[in-house]
Image (cartoon, coloured by chain):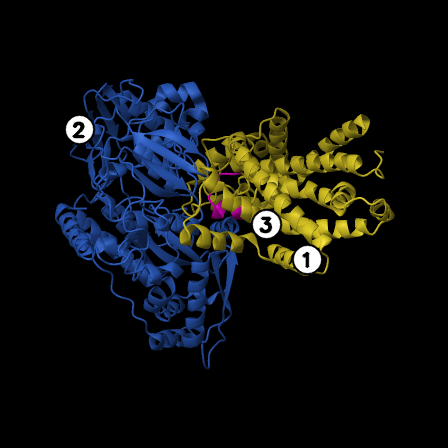
Chain colours: A blue, B yellow
Amino acid sequence: MNRASARALVVALALESLVGACERDRPTFGPETRRHRDNVLYVGGGSEPESIDPGKSYDGPGIDVIRELFEGLLRYDPKTLEPLPGAAESWEVSEDGRRYVFTLREGLVWSDGTPLTAHDFEWSWKRVLAPETAAQYAALFWDIEGGKAYNLGSGSRDDVGVRALDDRTLEVRLERPVPWFLSLLPFAPFCPVPRHAVERHGMAWTRPENIVSNGPFRLVRWIPNYEIVLERNPTYWDRDDVRLDGAVLVVSEDTHSMLRLFRAGELDWLGSNVRPPPEYVPHLRGKADYREDRYLGTYFYWINLREDRNPGSPLKDRRVRRALLLATDREAIVRHVARGGQRPADGVVPDIFFEMGYPRPSPVPFDPEEARRLLAEAGYGPGGKRFPTIEILYNTHEGHRQIAEAIQQMWKRHLGIEVRIENQEWKVFMSNRLEGHYQLARAGWIGDFLDPYSFLSQFLSDSDANEARWKNAEFDRLLQLALSEPDTRRRYALYAQAEAILMEELPVLPIYYYSQNTLIGSWVRGFHPNAQDIHPLRSLWLEAAP
Amino acid sequence: MIRFVLRRILGIFPILLVVFTFSFVLMRVAPGGPFDAEKPVPPEVKRNLELRYRMREPWCEARFLPALQGVRSPDEERALRRASPWASRAERVCTGLFQYGWMLGNYVRGDFGPSYKYKDRSVNEFIRAGMPVTLQLGLLAVTFALGIGLVAGLVAAVYQNRWPDHLAMIAALLGISVPNFVLGPVLILVFSLGLLWFPPARWESLSHVFLPGLTLGSAYAAYVARLTRGGMLEVVRQDFIRTARAKGLPERLVILRHALRGGLLPVVSYLGPAMAALFTGSIVVERIFNVPGMGRYFVDAAINRDITLAMAVVVVNAVFLLVANLVVDVVLGILDPRVRYE
């Protein structure tokens, strides 16, 4: 993200929160004043973290905890998510964008007092790549020289391009320039892990009694499926800037019970892993402690284009796919079905990027007339072939069902197409989607980093995430070209060209851009909505706390 | 009697083996694996994971489908498997057998193995953390069930076909027919969000445990009430009760000393399986009240295809059930002179 667009975003967000402040006298969903008396933040944590080991993490709740316990070379700016100096105080990037040298702060220590050095980073990153670690985010390190080979078992640990030149200097060499490399560094897998504790305790090193960390908070208690308790880490380099004494993350998968806890004043904030269900939203909207912001994600349907599946399916005709998209009233879906502040999608790159200078894709109108014309052109409809029944597959969930039903109805009404909708339990659904046993399948994509590449790369011909198995050489070429383009605007222009091809070809039907809605007490200060819904606790504080 | 108990205890092990095997097969043949996710990990990374968790066995691959080890994408693997279905099946069965042996070996050592979903933890830790909570909640629910159920049943039997009877039986009917996912939120709405008497969820103090205990116990209380009433009514018609009354014993003694003992028999036989169910927890109540027990894993672990965790809760539940039934049989023998240990 370039500087000007970042600034524009900050101003926009600041204005938004100003408006929020003026409306303080609106009614609230939770209590009007805080129930708890301590300087500890009570947050909904969502489901049980799969792992809080930075090297092994892969799930949202786990990554949220890791962000508090550990700090990488860089950390997130709470407003813009741009990388700020973390464990590293400065860094240099070589001319060709392939060599980074980081200088660590002086006197860094782990929470047990052991010095933290560049060697810790080298060891931790290589640990993620070690095949026996079986880290799910290992592929993020494949751009590091020799990283992929080592991870796949064909290379050696010593050839990986991460090296501690001395205790305070870390050198990283990349295979190719990665424009957003710095923005990856605050992310959990890039955080250091304490070698001495990992080697001593094995898998159990993340238990409260064993864990050693370097972040703003340390782990005090972790009861599975119940709570995670954090307290300020007295050895953190910037401890004086951490204003909370600690935090309690209440772990529960039951959204309703979380809402009740908030209502009763037991939670200060619903947290970023718990979303009020759509049926609550009309009731919550207008409440002073409810907020709705945009989120870095896109909701869409895959259209299966695999050659070995669904032979003769009309969906393999581009005009049919276009017709389906034109006959989908996404505005109505957003307004009456999803109901949580989503915006109809005209592409796969979320609208958050538009303010950062990403060119807006040409709008897709709701145009049943044109849709019928395209369908007739493809040989279906009155006087033509009969359109066979098609099927929408989705994972069992009330919200997905309602959207699928709405689309079923729209296509029936506007195109006369029979649509069957089928729901499957999550793992069965995923297995069928990955195996290509579907015609249309629901999908949601959340960005891992603030670059449109995070959304577009899944459509590369050789991507495993390309579940339509759509292949387009020009698309691949444009994306490749974009990677070596350091200038953000020009890179975005290339992305936009690629996205235009995607929208021409339509291996997906984009439906809406995600929103994030949450409940947060007015006494929680320092909260800034941002694209990835990342809110480091170190920048939050409680009004009138002791 | 000791021989009877010993024989029954020995009999538990083959049953457990059957339960273990059956749940293993079910978990393995269910479509979808523990590592399937919306954001698929690269196939090589997934392979590392599967090797680590014994979902792949290099020996089986080498023996039956050697080409598998050179495969670089899921599409290639699918094509390969489709090309030689029998070898692919043999490889799968072989891998399954290895995994089965590995898990069985772990069980013999008292280790439920690593969780497939929660990568920092072993299954034993989840059971160890969840079981005490579930037992507390279960005990509380049993207390509620017996406390409310016995009294209501006794009153109903003593005042048969009069208003206390009707009142108790209508309450019991409601208790049986209102599911706990309705009762729980209603209780919260009234007693915690409305009257502010109890906290709406979590497991901290005595005031936190009351509502979940009541929610979980109410259906059981209703059954206990009906069974007590039925058992009592049957017993009070028998000759020895008439004898007791004829001797001039006060009615209170007739009921409490003579009738109750026989009238409770159906309740005792019901309590065995009921307690086994209560002590393995309730997914619904645990979720609604955010109770950190182990009941949730019955559903969650199966949905996540967390093979080891799902099997562990099934096996633990089987142990509870078998032991509870054994205890009930022993208690029945003590209460009922007609029962003999064979």
Instruction: Tell me: residue A488, above or below residue A322.
Output: above
- Which quadrant would residue B337 be assigned to in this image? top right
Give the structural element (helix, strand or loop) at label 3: helix
Chain of the residue on which disc 3 is drawn: B
Circle nearer the viewer, 3 or 1: 1
Which label's residue is closer to the chain start, 3 or 1? 1
Q: Which residues are magenta?
A: B284-293
Helix, strand or loop for disc 1:
helix
Instruction: In the rendered structure, find residue B218 and report the number of the disc placed on it.
Output: 3
Q: Position of residue A399 (x, y in %)?
A: 43, 59
| Residue type indicated by callout 2 | Glu
- Report the residue at 25% width, 61% height from top: A361
Q: Residue at x 68, y 42 (%)?
A: B271
Chain label for disc 2: A
- Which of pointers 3 and 2 indicates the residue nearer the eye? 3
Check residue A198 for magenta coloring: no
The mark found on residue B165 in the picture is 1
Percent x, y for residue A145?
Answer: 30, 30
Picture quadrant where residue A218 is located: top left
Query: Residue A89 — which label?
Result: 2
For label 2, the crowd category at 10 Å Cα-Cα, with few meaning under 14, some 14 to 19 and many 20 or more, is some
Decide: few, some or many residues near mark 1? Use Cα within 10 Å; few <14, some 14-19, many ≥20: many
